[in-house]
Amino acid sequence: MTKGELIVACIKLMFDNDDEQLDPEAISEMEEYKDRTANIIESINRGYSRVIALKKMPFYTFTITSESPNNVVNGMARYDIDVIGDMTIQKVTLVDNNLALSDVPYKLTTNRDTSRRELQIRQLTGNERYVIQYLPFRYLQYSDLDTMEIPCPDNINRLLPYFVKGDLYEDSNAQLALLSTNKFESYLNDLPTQQDVVFKRVKDVYNFF
């Protein structure tokens, strides 16, 4: 699903607008809806936060070892994470000999020379490795093109219009807002809850399976 398709779905549900033909490739620029799309995007992102909080957003893991390519700056290792694509890191766990030691702090930076995203973290030693739990997803931005494919499963995207209607109608029509919110929560509850990372099956950042 594209950003424009999701916005159109939200508009059609909010305004019971099934008859008007809306162009999903240019919805953000339509004068009639231009001012509303900003609120819709903000609400969509709040909906994603709700999905993540309830652990309904699928997540994946990759590993970094002491042999993974990296640059060292001021004693900190920097790993190129753009090889993964769009993603939101949830946590980084230090593992040694298959034992999870602790979640560790990290920084996300942008390489000034390449403009690629990097994970900045303490250098590994010996058999240590990092297991990074991440969502193949990022929040929408105003600057995203309407034609951009949203890096989120469509079965989740299809629920978001119900959240948006409940969120944005809260002040103007509390009854409709409650009905829509209840639908969203009910559909969301039917999705599988994601389990915590298990360290038996992971993938290396440079060797996918």
Image (spheres, grey):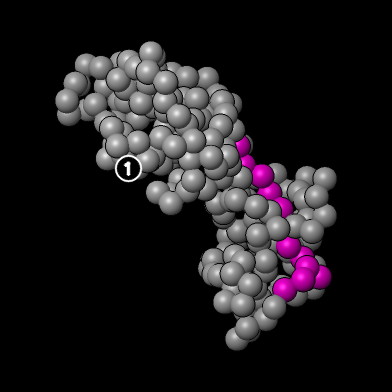
As drawn, is 94 to the left or to the right of 40?
right
Q: How many marks?
A: 1
Q: Which residues are magenta?
A: 53-70
Residue 122 in view, yes or no: no
Judge from the rendering whether residue 15 lies leftward or rightward of residue 185; answer left or right. left
The amino acid type of the residue labelled 1 equals Ala
Q: Is residue 65 above or below residue 86?
A: below
Q: Identify which residue is drawn at 34% across, 17% down.
A: 17
User: What residue is at 19 percent from the left and 21 percent from the top?
Assistant: 173
The picture places residue 194, in percent across and down from the top left corner, at 59, 35
Could you tell whether 131 is left or right of 141 in the image?
Answer: right
Q: Quadrant of residue 73?
A: bottom right
- 170 up-or-down from 109: above or below: above
Mark 1, other Cα within 10 Å: few <14 / some 14–19 / many ≥20: some
Image: 114 above or below 47 = below
**Which residue occupies 59% across, 69% down?**
115
Q: Secondary structure at mark 1?
A: helix
Q: How far across and down, in percent of the image, does residue 44 sit?
A: 40, 37
Frontmost residue, 205 versus 45: 45
Whether 63 is among the magenta residues is yes
Q: Residue at x 57, y 77 (%)?
A: 112
Which quarter of the rendering shows the C terminus? Answer: top right
User: On the rendered structure, is 40 left or right of 108?
Assistant: left
Per the image, the residue denoted by label 1 is 38
Farthest top residue? 19
Image location (x, y in percent) of residue 65: 77, 65
Q: Is residue 169 visible?
A: yes
Q: Position of residue 3 (x, y in %)?
A: 49, 38
Q: Per the image, is 77 magenta?
A: no
The residue closer to the viewer here, 81 or 182, is 81
